[in-house]
Amino acid sequence: ELGDYSHYMQKEIFEQPQALSNTLEMISGAGQLLPGIFGAEAADIFNQVDSVLIIACGTSSYAGMTAKYWIEQVAGIACNVEIASEYRYRQSVPNPKQLVVVISQSGETADTLAALHHAKAQGHAFTLAICNVPESAIIRETALRFITRAGPEIGVASTKAFTTQLSALFLLTLLLAKAKQRLSEANEKAYLDELRHLPIAVDKVLALEPSIKAWAMHFANKHHALFLGRGRHYPIALEGALKLKEISYIHAEAYPAGELKHGPLALVDSEMPVVVVAPNDEMLEKLKANMQEVSARGGQLYVFADGGSSVKSSEGVHVLQMPEHYGLLSPVLHVVALQLLSYHVALVKGTDVDKPRNLAKSVTVE
Ligand code: F6R
């Protein structure tokens, strides 16, 4: 089943272009997006909702955090993200006009299911599940649903499920923007074209595997790593750090880069590699100033740049030049590079990549 691959995780990383095109199949020839892809009642519900609440665990929650940046910017409605195990036990203020979105690869995560039950008990009727398993528990309990078509994910560390969740959340963003009259026909067409081109763009990132692999040995003998990002790439930094800790057992933390001075800078020295998600976007100049703060303390920077970026390699600054800059969808490309980094660090360390210690694929107990 593994074919030419050494691990399921590697296979699943490389299946992402196909997983994305399967998930996005319904837009292949379409000039416009129809709400029906989320269910028969979607048009009616999207017209009524005034905000979004996303609930999930782990990697799925980072997909939700990325979507928050998209939904607020493109659809212009408020979006909050909650960790399921917190939301289910806390006293929140329900808003019946809020769209509650639960995201789960397996559809069986106990806390996410319980959080959905809690939301419904609080009077939330506008519920939507984004899930990779059509026959799962979660799918049967929401008003609306979207099935990602990543195919079975065997590796415990989530990869292709995450990027397909992102693609589903981007479709949701566009439909909410349409319902709120915030999306021109020209923009809709442009975003759909970008989505259609995404599998090819991911392929180009996968082609960088040899260069990413060459960085792995710089991490394998370290005990800690710091991941930095800003804006919609902050959740991608969180996901990169989670992947590294899960499969290589290296302690990794992620921060929005603007927070460096407020504490984590104290940790930086030559033994703490700092990974920077640095797309060529509106935050790049700010991010360069943050990188300078790291360099000044002797920190080693590993920078994922893209699209003719002005970030240059120098002493202590290692730059991987990724292909085109991909605008709003750039998180999808940058996370693929970080998946490859953690995979190759784990290989150097010789850990059990597909079955990391203490973890289970599907967390069906609290
Ligand atoms: C990390 C990972 C976990 C899951 C989390 C939620 O690589 O896989 O953090 O994302 O356990 O699982 P699902 O999405 O099945 O609810």
Image (cartoon, helix red, strand yellow):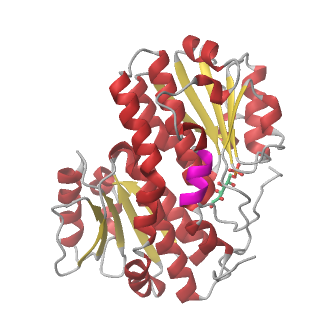
- Image coordinates of residue 175 in percent, x first then y, are 51, 25
x 47%, y 43%: residue? 66
Q: Is residue 282 left or right of 192 when viewed as pictured? A: left
| Prevailing SS of the magenta stretch | helix
Q: Is residue 88 left or right of 166 when viewed as pictured? A: right
Q: In this view, does 278 lie above or below 176?
A: below
Q: Is residue 222 above or below residue 60?
A: below
Q: In this view, does 339 lie above or below 315?
A: above
- Image coordinates of residue 205 in percent, x first then y, are 41, 66
Front residue of 313/180: it is 180
Q: In which quarter of the image is residue 125?
A: top right
Front residue of 208/92: it is 208
x 44%, y 58%: residue? 200
Q: Is residue 319 left or right of 89 when viewed as pictured? A: left
Q: In which quarter of the image is ligand 1?
A: bottom right
Q: Reply yes or no: does residue 119 show up in magenta.
A: no
Q: Is residue 226 above or below residue 179?
A: below
Q: Judge whether residue 95 can be spotted in this image.
A: no
- Image coordinates of residue 214 in percent, x first then y, are 39, 85
x 53%, y 88%: residue? 348
Please state the extent of the stretch shown in magenta in the rendering: 17-23
Q: Judge whether residue 38 can be spotted in this image.
A: yes
x 75%, y 43%: residue? 111
- Image coordinates of residue 325 in percent, x first then y, are 29, 54
**Which quarter of the image is occupied by the N terminus?**
bottom right
Front residue of 149/229: it is 149
Q: Quadrant of residue 144?
A: top right
